[in-house]
Amino acid sequence: MKKLALLTVVILLSGCVATPKYTTFKELTPPKSRGETTNDYLKKNLFPANSQWTEEFRIKGKTIGIDTFTGNENGSPLATQTITRRLLDIKKTLDKKNSGNSFNIVDRSTLRKRKDELEMNDGGFVKKDRNTQLVLIGKAISADYLLDGSVTEYTNAQQMIVLKTHYQKGERARYIKDYNKLMADIDTEITRLENLDLPTQMLMGGVAVVQQKIEDLRRRKASTVSIEQYDEEFKKKRFNESLGIASIGVTARLIDVQTGEFVWLYQDEHRGLSLMRGMQSVADKLIEKMLEKDFKQEDLKLTKNR
């Protein structure tokens, strides 16, 4: 009789009260990630380094000769050609802004001709020390300064690098927010189901059904990937890649032809994927440093491909 009365109550309640529903939860969207690119790696790990020493000197309105760079049979000719060409490029730009009064460059053919003449006419020229030779060459071409240098490194060697995986911007914070909300919502639903009275549980399918739902929610909570687990996963993701790393080292110096003293010494190193572009980068920075006292920095920018 008691069971019949309880069933009657449940039936009557179901006729006038809406059946309670379980709360549903959407799946979390994993944080978006991206693999580290080769350029990412190079920017962080193969940074260029340069240094310089300088006395007081001015290039504006002066004449410069560029002697052949030495040190490497492949890199030295490229350094000489690249620095000469880039210096001519920046001279054109500066001449337009300074009414043709930036500086003068002795062309390479004239310098070689005067150098050959000195070697032929002065039997002791080749026996003189390098500084004396530079002074004689500079005076022969009527230059105020003579630029020379050496390529200390010019290699393109295979190197194994390790690329990592990381989150896209804002994705980690977004996932933490979504994860914390889901965990709180699941806890709230579990608490609600645990406190349901018997008639309501019967309306929702019975005590066993409600208990199964609570267990399902607990398993859902335990199986949802936390941000700490994603962090650990990303730490393990590594992609090895073999690259040809171009390594370039250049030293340069500027000699005052009248005094025979060096007024500027410069050293630069570059690491990248291309010897040609690397040499252009070194040449651009060298020229900017050499001319920075006489001209505006924005006028000395030769290229965006640094």
Image (spheres, rainbow, N blue to C red):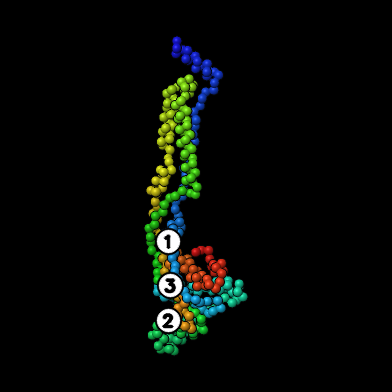
Considering only order in the chain, which callout, 2 or 1, is on the residue closer to the N terminus? 1
Could you tell me if residue 47 is visible in this image? yes
| Residue in the foreground of this view, choosing between 95 and 126 | 95
Q: Residue at coordinates 43% horizontally, 29% vertically from top-left? A: 214
Q: Which three-letter amino acid code belongs to the residue tagged 3?
A: Thr
Q: CA distance from mark 3 to mark 2?
A: 16 Å
| Residue in the foreground of this view, choosing between 72 and 297 | 297
Task: Give percent across and percent down for residue 42.
Answer: 44, 59
Residue beneath label 2, please?
131
Label 2 secondary element: helix
| Residue in the foreground of this view, choosing between 83 and 20 | 20
Q: Which three-letter amino acid code belongs to the residue tagged 1?
A: Leu
Residue beneath label 1, please?
46
Considering only order in the chain, which callout, 2 or 3, is on the residue closer to the N terminus? 2
Residue beneath label 3, please?
251
Task: Give percent across and percent down for residue 177.
Answer: 49, 41
Placement of 226 over or under 295, stated as above or below: above
